């Protein structure tokens, strides 16, 4: 078995007008016992290069310094990308039923709401806000995986009050929810 790996983020210029990308060929252990397989792969590569009209630029011992990076690859991924990767590696919300997922959604949304209000009934510490934002990212991925539209978890003040109780928020949050709902009803 063998495979080819192209590196499209790195390049070198081999002539004034020819931009070249590295291609690594990894051969499996069967080549050790049947070296002719390697010769077949090399024949196919060279035939393809000729067919495409390019010069054969194979290098026996290439140096990484021969190539430069096309795009800047950051040392650290943005937070939201890391959160997505973390959830794909550990999709812990998959174990929840849709009702449990909705309850968790309500809890996350309640904390996020408190985090971004000007005068919230409860001040959420920055670390908890960041954790809640990560949980929200995970929630969105799980809802997408299940094809649950966000409208399926439409706001309901009774569920919000239940969420406040589950996560141990003070009664001032429940009163705030009821006040907001009353103001909303008066405005309609």
Image (spheres, rainbow, N blue to C red):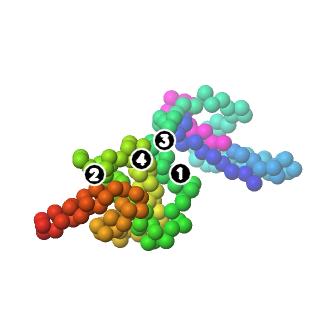
Q: Nearer the viewer, residue 188 or 1?
A: 188
Q: Which mark is residue 128?
A: 4
Q: Is residue 169 left or right of residue 52?
A: left
Q: From the viewer's perspective, is the residue at label 2 or at label 3 nearer?
A: 2
For disc 1, the marked residue is 86
- Asked if the residue at tag 3 contacts the one at tag 4, i.e. Cβ–Cβ closer than 8 Å, the answer is no
Q: Nearer the viewer, residue 32 or 47?
A: 32
Q: Is residue 108 left or right of residue 19?
A: left
Separation of residues labelled 2 and 4 (CA atoms): 16 Å
Q: Position of residue 41 (x, y in %)?
A: 73, 49
Identify the magenta region: 12-24
**Mark 2, secondary structure of its residue:** loop
Q: From the viewer's perspective, is the residue at label 4 or at label 3 nearer?
A: 4
Q: Which mark is residue 77?
A: 3
Q: Nearer the viewer, residue 74 or 105?
A: 105
**Mark 3, secondary structure of its residue:** loop
Residue drawn at x 46%, y 56% as measured from the top left? 138
Q: Is residue 111 left or right of residue 58?
A: left
Residue extending furthest toward the front? 171
For disc 2, the marked residue is 121
């Amino acid at each position: 078995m063998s495979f080819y790996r192209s590196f499209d983020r790195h390049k070198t210029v081999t002539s004034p007008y020819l931009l070249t990308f590295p291609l690594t060929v990894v051969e499996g252990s069967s080549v050790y016992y049947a070296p002719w397989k390697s010769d077949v792969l090399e024949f196919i590569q060279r035939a393809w290069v000729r067919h495409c009209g390019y010069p054969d630029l194979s290098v026996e011992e290439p140096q990484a310094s021969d190539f430069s990076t096309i795009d800047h690859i950051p040392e650290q991924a943005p937070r939201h990308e890391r959160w997505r990767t973390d959830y794909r590696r550990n999709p812990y919300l998959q174990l929840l039923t849709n009702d449990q997922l909705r309850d968790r959604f309500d809890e996350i949304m309640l904390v996020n709401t408190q985090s971004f209000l000007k005068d919230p009934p409860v001040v959420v510490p920055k670390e908890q806000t960041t954790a809640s934002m990560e949980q929200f990212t995970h929630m969105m991925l799980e809802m997408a995986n299940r094809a649950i539209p966000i409208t399926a978890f439409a706001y309901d003040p009774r569920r919000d009050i239940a969420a406040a109780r589950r996560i141990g928020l003070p009664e001032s949050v429940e009163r705030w929810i009821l006040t907001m709902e009353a103001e909303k009803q008066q405005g309609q």
